[in-house]
């Protein structure tokens, strides 16, 4: 097998507009102080005069690259837990492994400033020559980073008939009321309600001195008729533009069961109607899904193509966490159009497979095309991608280089950071890997079992019962309530499957 080679160094990108790049390239399992940008041949192909030569090399080794847009969504995992708690399996089409994997805390090293750190580690499995390789990206912590910019949030609330079910509109109202008390005085909110039509209930209003008025507008929301989600999103963006605040972070927050049945019901058609507002003003969409019957595909497509994120809530505790903890983290933005590219060494890697990210794949040649959408990421986030990797028998040496590319939210200047993995850094087994790595593997195995088809993730246990035992042991070891919930969900799947 020909070794993939590039003959120039990765373009060194300087920090701009106060954006500081971390020199971190992983952890004890990375290649130390030597960055992937300094390695000849295995970093993401660079731009420059020799680009055509590098393209020829890539075509000769078409298997070595994997490119995807970053995703911090978690709705798929939370909706699967709701379905299992209700005594049913989730529709396999709603199971997205990357959202299972990204639902759990990680211990990646954080960068000192804006941008990302890159951690690449892995563990061998019981399947011969197969390993799991984890690519972990982390932004700076949300705490201690100075004052965030003020927020201008336009809430688009579904008040259609299906939202009358307990745990839908009532949950949204309670959560919005709590959030209103916790937002800062210099933040602003607007409120749009939609059923068969959409109307602005509250124009963009500063919190300072107006909290009672905002509480009244939330409390007066009431159930109406059909679900014209397209009209709601369009009116929401119109209101967001009308109330646009320079120097503020402007967001549209859609709260709905996404069971659209009137007007435009296609994500592309809905987003086309507000494409000018999105592109000109950079207003992103944050989707909050509710309800036991939930239009997962529509909400996910809207958020992905609207440069935003989705979450799913089913109880007051989850709702408060989303509106009072997660949403504030999304107000500040660390990176726009973030993409990752992993280059596997063809001399050590026989084959590889990215687990999940099915609708987040990006053409390899578009990695450095900044006109191609990526993902938006804020402070305090981690993004994890898990690969199944089959190594050449007895392979030694360099295994992979992961590179993340993003744009500064203000200047749109591009930046990159990379990390390496060597074969001798692979843990000998999953049992010897760090606990957080094992949680990542269990989450991926769970998603794979729920999807029931396709290629099996290497090292998967024999069934839900054995997987539940692994999750319970990890919950005891980590003392993490989220891992407890994972073990319970897997146990519910095991009992239902019998």
Image (tube, rainbow, N blue to C red):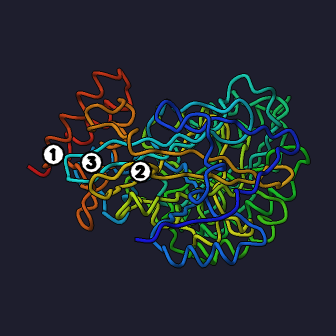
Q: Which mark is residue 386?
A: 2
Front label number (2 vs 1): 2
For the residues labelled 1 and 3, the Cα–Cα distance comes to 10 Å
Quarter of the image holding residue 331?
A: top right
Q: Residues within 10 Å of mark 1 (few under 14, many from 20)?
A: some
| Of pointers 2 and 3, the one earlier in the residue sequence | 3
In this view, the residue in front, 318 or 3, is 3
Q: Which mark is residue 84?
A: 3
The outermost residue toward the left is: 498
Residue 158, image x, y percentages: 58, 57
The residue wearing badge 1 is: 494
Helix, strand or loop at mark 2:
strand
Q: Indicate whether 143 appears above or below 290.
A: above
Whether label 2 touches label 1, CB < 8 Å: no
- Asked whether the viewer can see residue 78, the reply is no
Helix, strand or loop at mark 3:
helix
| Of pointers 2 and 1, the one earlier in the residue sequence | 2
Left or right: 70 as drawn, with respect to 478:
right
Residue 98, image x, y percentages: 44, 53
- Asked whether the viewer can see residue 235, the reply is yes
Helix, strand or loop at mark 1:
helix
Quarter of the image holding residue 358?
A: bottom left
- Quadrant (top left, top right, bottom left, bottom right) of the N terminus: bottom left
Q: Residues within 10 Å of mark 2 (few under 14, many from 20)?
A: many
Q: Residues within 10 Å of mark 3 (few under 14, many from 20)?
A: some
For the residues labelled 2 and 1, the Cα–Cα distance comes to 24 Å
| Of pointers 1 and 3, the one earlier in the residue sequence | 3
Left or right: 315 as drawn, with respect to 336:
left
Residue 87, image x, y percentages: 22, 49
What residue is shown at x 62% (from left), y 57% (from top)? 339
């Amino acid at each position: 097998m020909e070794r993939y080679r590039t003959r120039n160094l990765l373009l060194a990108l300087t920090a701009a507009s106060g954006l500081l790049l971390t020199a971190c390239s992983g952890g004890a399992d990375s290649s130390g102080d030597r960055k992937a940008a300094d390695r000849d041949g295995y970093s993401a192909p660079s731009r420059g005069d020799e680009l055509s030569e590098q393209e020829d090399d890539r075509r000769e080794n078409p298997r070595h690259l994997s490119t995807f847009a970053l995703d911090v969504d978690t709705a798929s995992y939370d909706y699967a837990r709701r379905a299992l708690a209700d005594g049913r399996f989730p529709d396999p089409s709603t199971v997205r492994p990357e959202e299972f994997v990204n639902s759990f805390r990680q211990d990646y090293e954080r960068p000192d400033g804006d941008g990302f750190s890159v951690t690449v580690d892995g563990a061998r499995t019981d399947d011969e020559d197969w390993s799991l390789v984890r690519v972990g990206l982390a932004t700076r912590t949300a705490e201690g980073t100075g004052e965030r910019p003020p927020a201008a949030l336009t809430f688009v609330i579904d008040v259609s008939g299906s939202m009358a079910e307990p745990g839908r509109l009532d949950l949204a109202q309670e959560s919005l009321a709590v959030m209103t008390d916790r937002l800062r005085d210099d933040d602003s909110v607007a409120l749009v309600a939609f059923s068969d039509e959409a109307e602005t209930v509250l124009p963009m209003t500063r919190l300072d001195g107006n909290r009672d008025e905002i509480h009244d507008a939330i409390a007066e929301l009431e159930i109406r008729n059909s679900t014209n989600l397209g009209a709601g999103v369009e009116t929401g963006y119109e209101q967001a533009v009308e109330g646009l605040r320079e120097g503020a972070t402007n967001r549209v927050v859609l709260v709905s069961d996404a069971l659209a049945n009137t007007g435009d019901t296609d994500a592309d058609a809905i987003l086309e109607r507000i494409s000018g507002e999105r592109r000109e003003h950079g207003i992103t969409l944050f989707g909050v899904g509710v309800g036991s019957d939930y239009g997962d595909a529509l909400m996910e497509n809207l958020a992905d193509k609207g440069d935003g994120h989705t979450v799913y809530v089913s109880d007051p505790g989850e709702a408060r966490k989303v509106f009072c903890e997660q949403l504030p983290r999304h107000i500040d933005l660390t990176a726009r159009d973030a993409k990752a590219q992993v280059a596997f060494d063809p001399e050590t890697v026989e084959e590889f497979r990215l687990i999940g990210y099915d609708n987040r794949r990006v053409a390899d040649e578009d990695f450095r095309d900044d006109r191609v959408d990526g993902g938006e990421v804020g402070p305090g986030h981690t993004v994890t991608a898990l690969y199944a990797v089959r190594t050449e028998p007895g392979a030694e040496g360099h295994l992979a280089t992961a590179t993340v590319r993003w744009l500064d939210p203000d200047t749109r200047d591009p930046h990159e950071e990379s990390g390496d993995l060597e074969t001798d850094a692979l843990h000998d087994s999953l049992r010897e890997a760090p606990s957080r790595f094992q949680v990542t593997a269990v989450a991926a195995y769970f998603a794979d079992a729920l999807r029931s088809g396709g290629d099996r993730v290497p090292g998967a246990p024999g069934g839900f019962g054995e997987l539940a035992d692994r999750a319970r042991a990890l919950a005891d070891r980590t003392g993490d309530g989220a891992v407890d919930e994972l073990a319970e969900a897997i146990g519910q799947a095991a009992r239902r499957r019998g």
